[in-house]
């Protein structure tokens, strides 16, 4: 056993969860990963791993008992917007029911601190301005809806059961740990930057979904936040909970938006190669513009992104993808 405070990290074998584990370890915590490895990777886990599903209450209870868990970071979720439109049940079962099961296990174990991985998708089709946290939440896809439901649940657990709960709404997680070994790696990659880089390496085809948006170049605009900065914010939130903070919902973004075409240009600048692509119609569930107002997180969490300039995002992602997806000869 360790005298470091032990944190259960659900989804800790995934992209963002594995980066959070590194940040926790560096900050003096002992992360215990709880993951069913359906999309996560055993190789991303450096410390203890409990292979289990959130819907398995007995496995969760064992994890809490065996590891003396003091707090939870909750990343485990189905997270593909497009898939949520065609298979909403998967999203409500995995995300909402799975979180209820986790919260029950936490209550049974007397653990009342949680940092929850939420999303900018809770806002839905917002207009073209930076979104503060009090902007009305009206998700336009089941993925965003499931995360919003969990935020509502956590607000009720705060007031009824005395939970400390941070909901961190991140915008487009991107980049990779510069020291290597972990990054974005999915069988069904739909995120812009990794898919574009996989296309450069000859692994997949790449499409721009919609060039008729009401934006300067016609493509959708997003706020890209480096995964290392996200991980640091989770540790900052955990420390506040330990000091008795009740939590709340906070945006994690940069406040700057880039269009799909601007991202493709930045990739060309870094790699010296043009991403081969076609243009297809818009995808259902995709908003035009999604950019954070990060000022509340700066004030409360002292959140200042240090790795989220576009050049660093692209450079660190490219370093990872050259290893994860070596160039295929066509």
Image: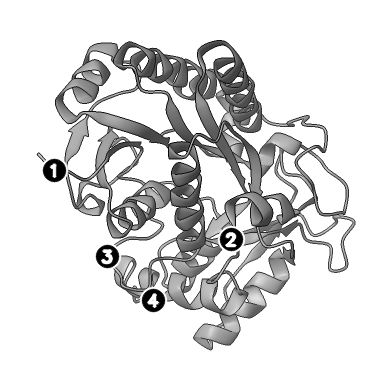
Q: Secondary structure at mark 4?
A: helix
In terms of sequence position, does the residue under pointer 3 or pointer 1 come before the other? Answer: 1
Rounded to the nearest angstrom, the CA distance separating label 3 from label 1 is: 25 Å
In the rendered image, which residue does mark 2 sit on? Answer: 225
**Quadrant of the drawing holding the C terminus:** bottom left
* Percent of width and height locating residue 227: 48, 59
Q: Are marks 2 and 1 in contact (CB under 8 Å)?
A: no
Q: Nearer the viewer, mark 2 or mark 4?
A: 2
Query: On residue 181, which mark appears?
Result: 3
The residue closer to the viewer here, 137 or 155, is: 155
Q: How is the image coloured?
A: one colour
The answer for how far apart the CA atoms under marks 1 and 4 are is: 34 Å
Q: Which residue is mark 4?
A: 319
In the image, farthest residue toward the left = 1
- Comparing marks 3 and 1, which lies closer to the viewer? 1
Q: Is residue 199 above or below residue 294?
A: below
The spot of residue 3 in percent (x, y) is 17, 43
């Amino acid at each position: 056993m360790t005298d470091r405070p032990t944190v259960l990290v659900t989804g800790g074998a995934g992209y963002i969860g594995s980066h959070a584990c590194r940040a926790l370890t560096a900050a003096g915590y002992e992360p215990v990963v709880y993951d069913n490895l359906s999309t996560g990777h055993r190789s991303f886990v450096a410390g203890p791993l409990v292979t289990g599903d959130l819907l398995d209450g007995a496995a969760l209870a064992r994890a809490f008992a065996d590891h003396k868990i003091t707090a939870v970071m909750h990343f485990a979720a189905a997270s593909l917007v497009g898939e949520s439109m065609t298979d909403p049940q998967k999203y409500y079962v995995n995300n909402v029911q799975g979180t209820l099961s986790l919260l029950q296990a936490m209550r049974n174990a007397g653990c009342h601190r949680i940092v929850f991985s939420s999303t900018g998708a809770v806002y839905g089709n917002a207009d073209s301005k930076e979104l503060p946290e009090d902007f009305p939440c009206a998700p336009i896809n089941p993925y965003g809806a499931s995360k919003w439901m969990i935020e509502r649940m956590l607000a009720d657990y705060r007031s009824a059961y005395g939970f400390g709960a941070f909901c961190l709404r991140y915008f487009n997680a991107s980049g990779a740990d510069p020291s290597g070994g972990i990054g974005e790696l999915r069988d069904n990659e739909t995120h812009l930057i990794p898919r574009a880089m996989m296309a450069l390496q000859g692994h997949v085809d790449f499409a721009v979904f919609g060039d008729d948006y009401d934006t300067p170049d016609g493509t959708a605009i997003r706020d890209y936040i480096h995964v290392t900065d996200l991980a640091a914010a989770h540790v900052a939130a955990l420390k506040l909970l330990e000091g008795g903070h009740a939590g709340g919902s906070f945006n994690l973004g940069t406040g700057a938006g880039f269009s799909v075409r601007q991202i493709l240009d930045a990739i060309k600048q870094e790699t010296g190669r043009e991403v081969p692509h076609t243009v297809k119609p818009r995808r259902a569930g995709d908003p035009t513009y999604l950019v954070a107002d990060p000022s509340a997180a700066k004030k409360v969490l002292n959140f200042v992104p240090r790795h989220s300039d576009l050049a660093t995002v692209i450079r660190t992602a490219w370093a990872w993808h050259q290893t994860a997806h070596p160039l295929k000869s066509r």
